[in-house]
Image (cartoon, coloured by chain):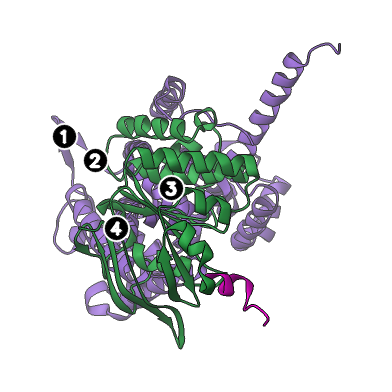
Chain colours: A purple, B green
């Protein structure tokens, strides 16, 4: 078996991470095309969602396919606090996070008795119940009519006025949220919590016998996950400016969150980032290939654009499906797993060629 | 006061009595052997003692604390921990990380846990494998990892479920030496084992289970010559 390096603080990934963040922060100064910035925002959103799911699904091994519940609660609470109670979203989002964490404690108490596929099914069922409730209780949620954002107030921060009018503002907000999420994920992985979560993923009975309170630590993992998913939901609601139960609580939201991690690689910090980088451009191009024309990558009468519009735009779920099948068949550890295997193989080959002595 | 007192423990699965009315007690520092033919209820008794199943009847008292209804993690933090007959390595974590998970039962500091883990890996002579993935170890080393991991939880009473099962004679001898060394350090141990020579050598006392009931209890030599024990293992003598 291969040996793995000691886990601990390493400088190189941190430097690369800071360089990437700096490059992304400088990016809007050079590129102003709204389509590209829009894609950037969606990318950050997907990274936050993926990192959040990774805590419970990746590290703790509890495959929740019901994260739309927390995403939707985040979106609705932020939106309703703004539209109904006139509370600005930078305060409202804390209410959204608190609501999602409380919900996660309840859902966890119900579903953590179940293991494996039963847990997955229960997580789907709970999210669907919440979606149907949001559709049905019109007096409170306005049902299928949904909420349209009127306007976000101006944020006064350190003497500057920030208006949430342009994609640029959302781009930077999304970047900050994504960086915070990644930092928290890193801190969790490199703590007692990270060890306990992984032990639960590897073998619940063994973990239990080694002094780990299963229900407690699973609930902590789910609460952390729900908090960031709700933040993503609130951010999403403010960005797209309209939510209804299907957009916020739909099962495709749950599936998309899981796909980000499966495609990138489950249980690693890098996985959701890579998964988001694959999935977001793909889904944006499939949904709106004209964007490529705006940006100037393709010309307006390009046959590629016409092909996508005619055959694939309404079938983006089909493309996702094929992608997932391919990943599960050929790269069960995701894109990150493929890269890791390639690196390990070339390292072994180099070690073998340098270590192979001339035959005696 | 006995360190562990098992009082009239019974465990029923439906109509089947996996343990019925088992009682014995263990003193500090001793090694208790637990033997019996397949299906005698040895592992079920371990599960009842460590909180995996609540006993249907009877009490388990550890250091004066009645354990009924306690979960395995609570039992572990009280100082009693078991290994698994079918080893359960945390496969995708390194050997060192596996042992650290055990050590984290007593500390929240990763650095302290790492020190404790490294020390326990030295005790079982697995320190050179610390950076390997646990899932890739051969069976002999998995058994040692299992022991290192429970030692890291700083137990007072160790329950070993067939730690020599599937090992070759040299590996078994290493485990025997390890168990005797742990005894010297004052650790109390209960050992389930099928290798009769080994169990006779290491045990201070032996409890024999058969069909869920306690057949007899005594010093290794008494137990080995007990007619009921011979009958349970080999069948009745043909007259």
Residue A260 visible, this orientation = no
Q: Please give the count of numbered marks on the rendered protein.
A: 4
State the mark number for residue A163: 2
Of marks 2 and 1, the one in the foreground: 1
Looking at the rendering, in which quadrant would you find the C terminus of chain A? Answer: top right
Instruction: Report the chain holding disc 3.
Output: A
Q: Give the residue drawn at x 23%, y 57%.
A: A96
- Residue A49: image x %, image y %? 41, 50
State the residue lying farthest toward the bottom.
B15
Q: Give, as a single range, the part of the protein colored magenta.
A: B229-239
Is there a contact, CB below 8 Å, between mark 4 and mark 2? Answer: no
Q: How far apart are marks 4 and 3 (CA)?
A: 21 Å
State the mark number for residue A157: 1
Left or right placement of residue A139 versus residue B223 in this view: left
- Residue B58: image x %, image y %? 29, 76
B78, A34: nearer the viewer: B78
Q: How far apart are marks 3 and 1 (CA)?
A: 40 Å
State the mark number for residue A198: 3
State the mark number for residue A288: none
Identify whether B212 is placed above or below A79. Answer: below
State the mark number for residue B75: 4
Instruction: Report the chain holding disc 1.
Output: A
């Amino acid at each position: 078996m291969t040996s793995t390096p000691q886990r601990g603080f390493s400088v190189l990934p941190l430097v690369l991470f800071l360089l990437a963040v700096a490059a992304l922060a400088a990016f809007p100064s050079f590129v102003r095309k709204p389509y590209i910035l829009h894609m950037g925002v969606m990318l950050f959103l997907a990274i936050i969602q993926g990192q959040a799911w990774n805590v419970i699904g990746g590290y703790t091994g509890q495959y929740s396919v019901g994260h739309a519940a927390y995403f939707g609660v985040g979106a609705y609470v932020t939106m309703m606090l703004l539209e109904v109670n006139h509370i600005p979203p930078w305060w409202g989002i804390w209410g959204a996070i608190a609501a999602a964490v409380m919900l996660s404690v309840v859902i966890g108490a119900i579903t953590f008795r179940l293991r494996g596929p039963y847990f997955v099914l229960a997580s789907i069922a709970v999210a669907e119940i919440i979606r149907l409730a949001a559709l049905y209780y019109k007096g409170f949620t306005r049902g299928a009519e949904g909420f349209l954002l009127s306007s976000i107030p101006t944020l006064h921060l350190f003497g500057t006025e920030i208006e949430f009018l342009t994609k640029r503002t959302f781009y930077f907000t999304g970047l900050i949220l994504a960086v915070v999420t990644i930092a928290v994920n890193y801190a969790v992985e490199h703590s007692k919590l990270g060890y306990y979560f992984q032990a639960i993923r590897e073998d619940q009975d063994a973990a239990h016998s080694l002094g780990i309170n299963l229900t407690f630590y699973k609930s902590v993992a789910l609460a952390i996950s729900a908090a960031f998913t709700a933040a993503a939901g609130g951010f999403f609601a403010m960005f797209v400016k309209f939510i209804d139960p299907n957009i916020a609580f739909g099962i495709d939201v749950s599936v998309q969150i899981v796909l980000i991690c499966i495609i990138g690689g489950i249980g690693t910090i890098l996985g959701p980032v890579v998964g988001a980088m694959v999935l977001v451009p793909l889904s944006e191009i499939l949904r709106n290939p004209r964007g490529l024309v705006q940006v100037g990558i393709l010309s307006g009468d390009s046959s590629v654009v016409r092909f996508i519009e005619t055959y694939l735009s309404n079938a983006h779920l089909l493309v996702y499906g094929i992608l997932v099948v391919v990943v599960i068949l050929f790269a069960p550890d995701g894109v990150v797993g493929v890269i890791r295997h390639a690196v390990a193989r070339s390292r072994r080959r180099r070690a073998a060629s340098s270590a192979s002595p001339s035959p005696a | 006061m006995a360190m562990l007192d098992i009082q009239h423990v019974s465990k029923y699965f439906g109509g089947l009595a996996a343990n019925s009315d088992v009682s014995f007690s263990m003193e500090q520092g001793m090694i208790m052997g637990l033997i019996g033919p397949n299906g005698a209820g040895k592992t079920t008794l371990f599960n009842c003692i460590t909180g995996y199943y609540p006993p249907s009847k009877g009490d388990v008292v550890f250091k004066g604390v009645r354990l009924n209804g306690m979960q395995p993690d609570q039992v572990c933090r009280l100082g009693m921990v078991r290994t698994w007959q079918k080893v359960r390595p945390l496969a995708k974590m390194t050997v060192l990380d596996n042992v650290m998970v055990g050590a984290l039962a007593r500390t929240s500091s990763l650095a302290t846990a790492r020190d404790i883990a490294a020390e326990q890996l030295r005790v079982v002579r697995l320190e050179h494998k610390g950076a390997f993935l646990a899932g890739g170890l051969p069976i002999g080393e998995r058994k040692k990892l299992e022991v290192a991991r429970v030692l890291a939880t700083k137990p007072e009473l160790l329950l070993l479920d067939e730690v020599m099962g599937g090992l070759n004679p040299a590996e078994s001898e290493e485990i025997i030496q390890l168990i005797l060394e742990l005894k010297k350090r004052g650790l109390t141990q209960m050992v389930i084992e099928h290798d009769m020579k080994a169990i006779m050598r290491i045990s201070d006392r032996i409890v024999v289970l058969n069909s869920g009931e306690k057949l007899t209890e005594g010093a290794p030599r008494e137990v080995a010559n007990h007619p009921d024990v011979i009958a349970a293992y080999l069948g009745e003598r043909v007259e």
